[in-house]
Amino acid sequence: MLSIYLVTSLKNNKKGKERDYMLRIQLKRRRELRTKKVLQKKDPKCVYWKYYDKIVDENGLKGAKCKHYPKTLAADTSTNGTSGLKRHARICPGNPDFKMKDQTTIHLEKKDDVEGGACEIKTLKFCVDYTRKPIAKMIIVDELPFFVVEHEGFRSLMNTVCPYFKAPSRHTIARDCGEIYLEQKAFHKGDDIGRLIQKCLSDWDINHVLTITTDNASSNDSAMSFLKGTLHNLILEGRYLHVRCIAHVINLIVKDGLSSRNKSIERIRNTIRAEKFEAAFKSYDLGDPNFRKELENEIPSPGDWHNAREISKVLEFFKKKTTYASASSYVNVNGYFREMMAIEKKIKVLKGSPIYKIMGNMMEDKFQKYWGHDKFENKLLYFATILDPRQKSRMIGVVYKEILMAEKKAEEKENDIDAKVEKIVGQIKTALEFVFREYELDYEMASTSSLSQFDTNTQVLSDGEDEFVTKFKAVGRSSTYKPKSELQKYLDDDEEEWDNNFDVLKWWKSSSSRYPIVSKMAKDILAIPVSSVASEPAFSTGGRVVDAYRSSLSPPIVEALICTQDWIRKSRRATNEGVDPTKFDDLGNGKN
């Protein structure tokens, strides 16, 4: 009415004709704008009608009856609109396409730490992030490419089982994988690792621990320090508790050596995936002038290819050493010392070569850091060599003499080298004697009752001895003569004949009556795992290899994926195993 009044009064005013015209234009524009907004808000067809049946009562009023719940709503679109239909459809208890925003569902979830299919009941509320996380774990554990989430089949599956979940892009899922890696890595702090190990030992009712094999992460050093202060019954108060994984030490040595050839390796890695493409890249470089420009002059040169071939020969040696040390189906700790010295000898050969001199120097620096003669603290690995009846301490002397002779200065004589070797072997024997004494003490405490019975029987027999025997015993006890210990007897005995198929555990089992204490030492020390990496998943061509989907990823991403897979997967079986295509024919014919 206010607008009409203004218009009428302006009509009778000649001076207001222009203002009347402008006001009409403004009112018209406002009406058009309101009409436009209404049209924008109004759906051309309400999609929620599929959940209702249209009804009209005797008074002509329109309504909508829910198909999934006994409820009727006013549905005259001219007066009621469709917002009520939409609102009820979203909260309807019987609607299969919608769930309440905060509604939870009950489901069975398998326990991670329990085998045999044990499950527990949990409540679950739909959350996009909660759903994306298992997808990221699936990609990590099953070694799938990131772009699997963009495949038509995957999106169709998700649209069927979870219509209100929007499948992420490959970039989003890659970030999710990175977040899982960082989340898992956060739990690998020293004290956390130490407490977890302590809990596991308690749960498994393990009261005596000789060694724990870990890689060279600083957090593991902290974990070992924590355990030394909390675990009881450690040999020599845990002096030899921490064994560094030989596979990780070799990896560090090789990485330092390869850093001298980083440019060549990087150029090849960034442009190709297999050596067979070398000729093709030569043709590309000649035939396409823009090829080099597009790759920013990172085309592998003939020198790069030569470097790669030479480096592969060096890496083959280290691969064999890692494979041997990482085996888990036979005793290998008794060969640790020889393998370690073989690596040192190989590095010295590399240092003497003009081609590998820089690489050899860098490798030697890393070798001396962990395995140098004056820094190799865990002598249990020397003890394992001595407790091999084929080698004993003589093997240590032979190997050290060869290494020191190669380093011999011009003014040094062979006698000087022999003196050094004798000193090294003597120090190792002395350390072994300390360990033997602890085992001897435990053995004596365990057999106190039987020894007491033995002394009583001896006293009964001595009642019939003559005075000369009594005098002989008295003189023997007061003399400075000391009988050989069991360990010394073992060391003085001849070595067994060398046999590559020699079963060291079987030998000690048959010799346990002769060396009861030393055999107990051998049983514990020869069981030490020298690597925390099993060779089967590390190098098996049918198992954990970097496949075509990941061979072009950057090293940090590959590291994150492999480490996270190792942390979160339940089984140690190799993943992504090849399948014989003919098996599908058997399955199709109903054969297992």
Image: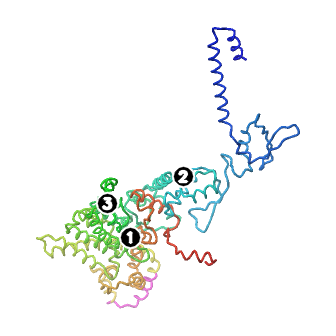
Give the x, y percent position of residue 273: 38, 64
In the rendered view, tell whether residue 215 sits above or below residue 56. Answer: below
Which label number is shown at residue 168? Answer: 2
| Amino acid bearing label 2 | Pro
Q: Residues within 10 Å of mark 3 (few under 14, many from 20)?
A: few
N-term mark: 2 or 3? 2
The secondary structure type at the circle numbered 2 is loop
| Amino acid bearing label 3 | Gly
| Amino acid bearing label 1 | Val
Which of labels 2 and 3 is toward the front?
A: 3
Which label number is shown at residue 530? Answer: 1
Which of labels 1 and 2 is toward the front?
A: 2
Residue carrying label 3: 287
Q: Quadrant of residue 464?
A: bottom left
Give the x, y percent position of residue 30: 64, 25
Q: Quadrant of residue 321?
A: bottom left
Q: Magenta stretch?
A: 453-468
Q: Residues within 10 Å of mark 2 (few under 14, many from 20)?
A: some
The secondary structure type at the circle numbered 3 is helix
Say if the magenta span includes residue 230. no
Q: Residue at x 18, y 70 (%)?
A: 407
Q: Residue at x 44, y 83 (%)?
A: 454
In the rendered view, tell whether residue 528 sits above or below residue 194. Answer: below
The secondary structure type at the circle numbered 1 is loop
Q: CA distance from mark 1 to mark 2?
A: 43 Å
Secondary structure mainly formed by the magenta segment: helix
Side (left or right) of 127 relative to 556: right
